[in-house]
Each structure stands twice: as C-alpha cells, then as structure tokens.
Image (tube, rainbow, N blue to C red):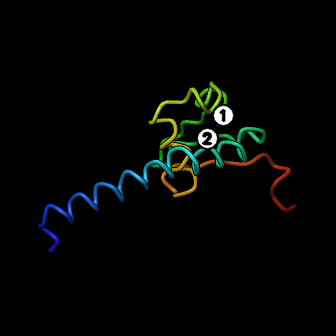
Amino acid sequence: MKNSESASKKMMKANAEGDEYGYNIFAKAIYDVFAPIKPKLHKRRGESAYFQWDEVFDKPFEELDINHRKCLVGLIEGKFVYELPLSYYND
C-alpha cells in the first residue's frame, strides 16, 4: 500500500505537521532559550568561521525566515555548532 494515493496523502500530511511543529514550535523554544544566552556560532566542517548570535539571528523570532528557523533546529540536531559563554562550563 505504500505506493497508493492514500498513503502519499498521509505521508504529505505527516510531513507538513512535522514541519509545522519543527519550524514553529520547536524552533521558537530553541530561540527562547538561546537568545538571552547568545552563544557563539561556528561553522561545522573544519572552517574557522565564527559568528555572533546577533549577526545570524538579528530579528525577533516571528520575523525569521524558514532558513533561519531550520538553523535553530540544527543547533539541537547537531548540524550546527555553538559555544556557550564560559560561565556555562565547569572549571
């Protein structure tokens, strides 16, 4: 039944619901936690580029586009790297 029209519609609906949750609810929760902390952001693959939080996320959450919201989720999924201020690490 996986090639049926009904299965395709169910899969498309499930994907849309997942995106709605991921890029709105989950991304907002990540933004709300990290925005006050303002971690330093790193490029992941061996590049030595660093970005300040406000350089990347320079708008309120509601004004961020889908790519920025995907980046927020990527912080948790390990697609992007962040460094918390020293006060968050043990001595």
Looking at the rendered structure, the kind of residue marked 2 is Leu
Q: Is residue 57 above or below residue 71?
A: above
Image location (x, y in percent) of residue 21: 51, 52
Q: Nearer the viewer, residue 11 or 60?
A: 11
Name the mark on residue 41. Answer: 2
Residue shown at 12% from the left, 67% from the top: 3
Q: Quadrant of residue 63?
A: top right
In this image, 59 relative to 24: left or right?
right
Image location (x, y in percent) of residue 81: 57, 50
Q: Secondary structure at mark 2?
A: strand
Q: Nearer the viewer, residue 53 or 25?
A: 25
Q: Residues within 10 Å of mark 2 (few under 14, many from 20)?
A: some
Image location (x, y in percent) of residue 6: 19, 63
Q: Are marks 1 and 2 in contact (CB under 8 Å)?
A: yes
- Among numbered discs 1 and 2, the one appearing first in the sequence: 2
Q: Residues within 10 Å of mark 1 (few under 14, many from 20)?
A: some
Q: Nearer the viewer, residue 2 or 76?
A: 2
Looking at the rendered structure, the kind of residue marked 1 is Trp
Residue shown at 77% from the left, 42% from the top: 37
In the picture of the structure, the residue carrying the numbered disc 1 is 53
Q: Quadrant of residue 2?
A: bottom left
Q: Which quadrant of the rendered structure holds the N terminus?
A: bottom left
Image location (x, y in percent) of residue 18: 43, 55
